[in-house]
Image (cartoon, helix red, strand yellow):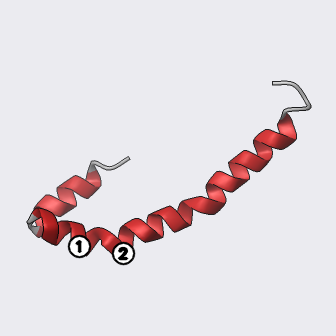
Amino acid sequence: MNRQDAPRATLLIMAVFALQPFAIGGWLALIPVVKETLGLSKSELALALMGMP
């Protein structure tokens, strides 16, 4: 990476970190719906959530 690419890379990293809370917030709001749709117990859901990256 050269010096001309550094500002662009910095902006892209900042965008990822700025948008990440919206993605996580959207997912957290849907966890009860997913749990009910898939018919998971509390322990099954906990195991699935622990396996998430």
Q: Determine the residue positioned at 86% across, 42% down.
A: 7
Residue at the spot 18% in from the left edge and 68% down from the top edge? 35
Q: Residues within 10 Å of mark 2 (few under 14, many from 20)?
A: few
Q: Position of residue 46 (x, y in %)?
A: 20, 61
Place of residue 28 in the rendered image (x, y in percent of width and height, measured from the top left): 37, 70
Report which quarter residue 1 is drawn in. Answer: top right
In this view, which residue lies farthest toward the right? 4
Q: Which residue is most to the top?
A: 1
Give the numbered dot on residue 29.
Answer: 2
Q: Is 30 positioned to the left or the right of 2 in the image?
A: left
**Rendered residue at 49%/62% (across/down):** 23
Q: How many marks?
A: 2
Find residue 48 and report its horizontal and vertical position in percent. 21, 54
User: Based on the displayed image, in which of its 4 quarters is residue 33 positioned?
Assistant: bottom left
**What amino acid type should be assigned to the residue bearing mark 1?**
Val
Residue at the outermost front position = 37
10 Å neighbourhood of mark 1: few (<14), some, or many (≥20)?
A: few
In the image, what residue occupies the spot 22% across and 66% down?
34
For residue 27, above or below residue 2: below
Q: CA distance from mark 1 to mark 2?
A: 8 Å
**Mark 2 secondary-structure assignment:** helix
Residue 45 disc label? none
In this view of the protein, which residue sits in the foreground, 1 or 38?
A: 38
**Residue matched to label 1:** 33
* Relative vertical location of residue 53 with respect to residue 31 in this rendering, above or below: above
Report helix, strand or loop for mark 1.
helix
Position in image of residue 50 (x %, y %): 27, 53
Mark 2 belongs to which amino acid?
Ala
* Left or right for 33, reference 12: left
- Do the residues under discs 1 and 2 have CB atoms within 8 angstroms? no
